[in-house]
Image (cartoon, rainbow, N blue to C red):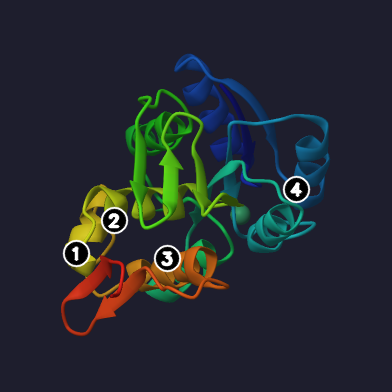
Amino acid sequence: MRILIVEDEPDLLDALKKQLQSSGYSVDGCGNGLDAEDYLKMATYDAVVLDIMLPGIDGLTLLKKMRAEGNTTHVLLLTALDSIENKVNGLDAGADDYLVKPFAYDELLARLRVLLRRHSGQTTNVLEYGGLVMDLNSRTVTRDGTEITLSSKEFAVLEYLLRNPGRVLSRDKIENHVWNYDFEGGSNVVDVYIRYLRKKIDTGFNKKLLHTIRGAGYVLREEK
Ligand code: CA
């Protein structure tokens, strides 16, 4: 597994590189957003640990550029700014996860393992409902044969819904299932991802599958 760390505090960059290398990862590191762009063009990474406040271009701008260019590499954002708004901005920009400084290395390693586990080691199951087909092995989704490209979090939310068709799932349930750490109550992260998903799986189709049940949550259901 190859990881790029982008962090402009030299001591932290050094420490992160050593930690990740000793955990068996292949690691590149740089301290400038523009250098990071070059690294991303030169190599394919399994994950990027990306600081937000950077010289050159900042982490959020770089992340948005990556996603706009179709780069789906897992990105774990690092930031000193601990607020719901910042988390949502990061997730909106296409981040897969978010870690607030200061953090414990063990937590970073655990979060990376979660990201990378989703990346591989799937079972060969196929989930189907209402014309949606999710292949957990190839991590592809189609609706009526049309391929739908999802981020890893969108995929995880949809996988959970597909495992529970017709069942109303609360925000908390979805959040706890997909984000298996404390993401702070009151965050609208689930709503954000449901909005993304709805756009991707229902737009352009006559029958809507993803429904909001006011005050209760969300359900994947074929309307009569
Ligand atoms: Ca910084």
Label 1–label 2 contact, CB within 8 A: yes
Label 2–label 3 contact, CB within 8 A: no
SS assignment at label 2? helix
Chain-order first, disc 1 or disc 3: 1
- Residue marked by disc 4: 32
SS assignment at label 3? helix
What kind of residue is marked 1? Answer: Leu
**What's the CA distance linking mark 2 and mark 3?**
12 Å
Across and down, in percent, residue 73 comes to 61, 41
What kind of residue is marked 2? Answer: Leu
- Residue marked by disc 1: 169
Across and down, in percent, residue 59 comes to 65, 57
Front-most of residues 120 and 125: 125
- Residue marked by disc 2: 161
Mark closer to the observer (1, 3): 1
| View quadrant of ligand 1 | bottom right
Please say whether residue 24 is visible from this viewpoint.
yes
Q: Quadrant of the C terminus?
A: bottom left
Query: Going 43% across and 73% down the picture, which residue do you hit?
Result: 207
Query: Going 39% across and 27% down the picture, which residue do you hit?
Result: 122
Numbered tag placed on residue 193 in the rendering? 3
Left or right: residue 92 compared with residue 57: left
| Vertical arrangement, residue 15 with respect to residue 179, above or below | above
- The answer as to whether callout 2 falls within 8 Å of ligand 1 is no
What kind of residue is marked 4? Answer: Asn
